[in-house]
Image (cartoon, rainbow, N blue to C red):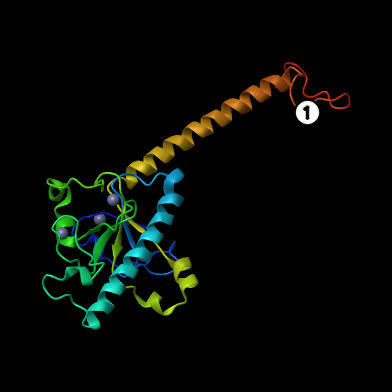
Amino acid sequence: MVNLCEEAGCLDVSLSREDLSRPHDTTHDLLKVRYPLFTREQGKRQRLAKQALARSRDIMHEYESSLKEGAMPTPGDESALTNVPSCILCHKTVMQPCWFCTHCEDDVFICMSCDHQNEVAFANYHGHHDYHIHDLVRCQKAGEDDELPVEERLANLEEKFTTKFTTQEAAIKDLQDAVHERLGRVEQMIQLMLTSKGLGNGTSPNNPGPKRGRI
Ligand SMILES: [Zn+2]
Ligand SMILES: [Zn+2]
Ligand SMILES: [Zn+2]
Ligand SMILES: [Zn+2]
C-alpha cells in the first residue's frame, strides 16, 4: 500500500520501495479517500473498493464493446444503450481514467476534469453521492496484471490512498499505542502491588510469592 497526495505529479509517480513486494507504478489501482482510512474500517472500505472497481470496469468494458459493435444509438433513441457511463456532475460520457464511487448504490462516475475542481464541482449537485464521505476508485484500463488469472489479480490488487489525512491517522494511531502502553504499564504495576501483598498471581502453598516489602 502506497500513500499519495493530490499534489500535481504525485499521482503519476512510479516508485520502488523496500517494503513493496513489487515496484509501484501508475497502472496500479487507486482509491481516493476524503477522510482517514481508520484501521477499524479499512477492511470494509477496501472490500467495497474492489467490488466497485470490478463493477466500473464491467460497465466501461460493456460500453466500449457496444461502441465497437456499432450499436451507437441514433439521435432520439438513447434508450437503445442502457448503460452509458456519464459523469454525475457534467453529464458528459466518461472516458477512462475516471473515478467511480465505492459507496453509492447507483453507478456514480466522476470525470477527471470535474474531480480536479474538487468540492466546487458539487455546488449544483443534489444527488446521493457524498463528496466528504464516499471513497472513489480510479477506473482505468487494467495494466499488465490483466494477463494474470482473476484470482491472482485480486491477490495482487493494491490500493493507494490519496489523502491529506494519512499522516493524521498515523498520529492518532501513535497516540492510541502510547495510551495502550501506559495502560499496560499501570496494569503491571497493580499486578506487582497485589503480588507483593500475597494476593495476586503466582502464590500457592509451595510458592508464597515475593515477601512483603521486597519488590
Ligand atoms: Zn505528494
Ligand atoms: Zn501500486
Ligand atoms: Zn464531469
Ligand atoms: Zn457516492
Percent x, y of residue 85? 23, 65
Q: Quadrant of residue 116?
A: bottom left
* Pick the front one: 93 or 22: 93
Name the foreground residue: 8 vs 72.
Answer: 72
Q: Is residue 200 left or right of residue 122?
A: right
- Looking at the image, which residue is at 26% across and 54% down? 5
Identified at 67% across, 25% down, the residue is: 191
As helix, strand or loop, the secondary structure at mark 1 comes to loop
At label 1, the amino acid type is: Gly
Horizontal side, residue 152 vs residue 145: left or right: right
Residue 214 seen anywhere in this rendered image of the structure? no
Residue at 57% x, 25% y is 186
Q: Quadrant of residue 96?
A: bottom left
Query: 127 above or below 11?
Result: above
Label tally: 1
Residue 57: horizontal and vertical position, in percent? 33, 68
Q: Is residue 198 visible?
A: yes
Residue 108's quadrant in the figure? bottom left
Query: Residue 199, percent across and down?
Result: 75, 19
Q: Is residue 61 above or below residue 180?
A: below
The residue where tag 1 is placed is 202
Which residue appears at 26% of the width and 68% of the height? 82
In the displayed orientation, state which residue is furthest to the right. 206
**How far across and how far down the image is residue 155, in percent?**
48, 66
Q: Residue furthest bottom?
A: 69
